[in-house]
Amino acid sequence: MTSPQESRAASPGPGPLRTRALTREASRARRLLAAGQWRPAAADSAAAAAVLARLSAPLPVRRAAPARTSATDRDRRLQRLLRTTLHHLDAGAVSPPAAALLAGVARAFLPWHTVPNPPLAAAAPGYGLAAAPADGPAVPATDAAEALLPGLIALFATLSAASPPGTVPLTPPVACWRVRHDGRFRHYARPAPGVWTAETVGCGACGATTGPWTVTCDWRTMTLGCPCGKVTHDHGLAFSEVWLLLPDR
């Protein structure tokens, strides 16, 4: 996989991709898979296969396509990769190490959440992307993101491969983490195609909505701790609605 430094060099955009978590989790996954310490369960392999299909998707073949069309095709491939990753991250079916890896991928490809096709409703998730520079619109770092694809294809091909018959899944432990977050969390739902709802999460004890929250995650569940001392598991938030809003780790 391309290092963050190499990604910065290749990027035409306003800043580096947030690849710290991806670099860490991808390296860890490779090591565990090579040592036989992670034998993926069926849900992990199925999610990896779905993400692999997006990673390796070819670009459309268009004759004499203008540069703008080609750029849109490239961004659309990355956006589909991000949305597929978010779907499996938030579905809650994968193991903790798979969730940590998917979250790292989502973190890196987050700039494509609304590029080139924004969600259809104003209430759809907003993940706090950096504002456009004053001298013009922000340009997604497409070259840097595409440089990550070959390494990720190799990793997800290994992860999606079926375990030999008779083998028992083996899931390595993943460290729990805790981080502080100042601000609101918004829980999003999609009751119908093109219809989104959003609700600000508040403390059930004191009603506070802006924290500072103490977020604790074991990659199966997340808890929110309020300054008043109330700790809740019943916030209804998806992984992406919490994890992607936190500082890069």
Image: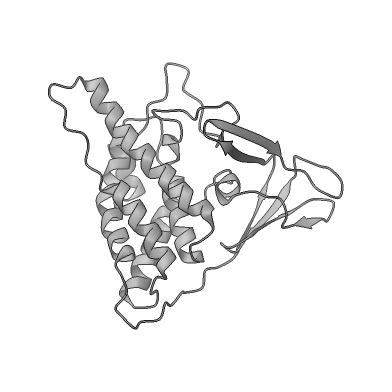
Against 53, is 133 above or below?
above
Residue drawn at 37 percent across, 44 percent down: 81
Tell me the quadrant of the picture where the N terminus can be found.
Answer: bottom left
Against 154, is 186 above or below?
above
| 183 left or right of 94 in image | right
| 123 left or right of 18 in image | right
| 190 left or right of 140 in image | right
Against 3, is 100 above or below?
below
Q: Position of residue 189 (x, y in %)?
A: 61, 40
- Based on the displayed image, in which of its 4 quarters is residue 151 positioned? bottom left
Residue drawn at 37 percent across, 64 percent down: 45
- Based on the displayed image, in which of its 4 quarters is residue 66 positioned? top left
Residue drawn at 73 percent across, 43 percent down: 201
Q: Is residue 249 visible?
A: no
Q: Residue furthest right?
A: 206
Residue drawn at 34 percent across, 66 percent down: 30
Q: Residue furthest bottom?
A: 166
Q: Residue furthest top?
A: 135
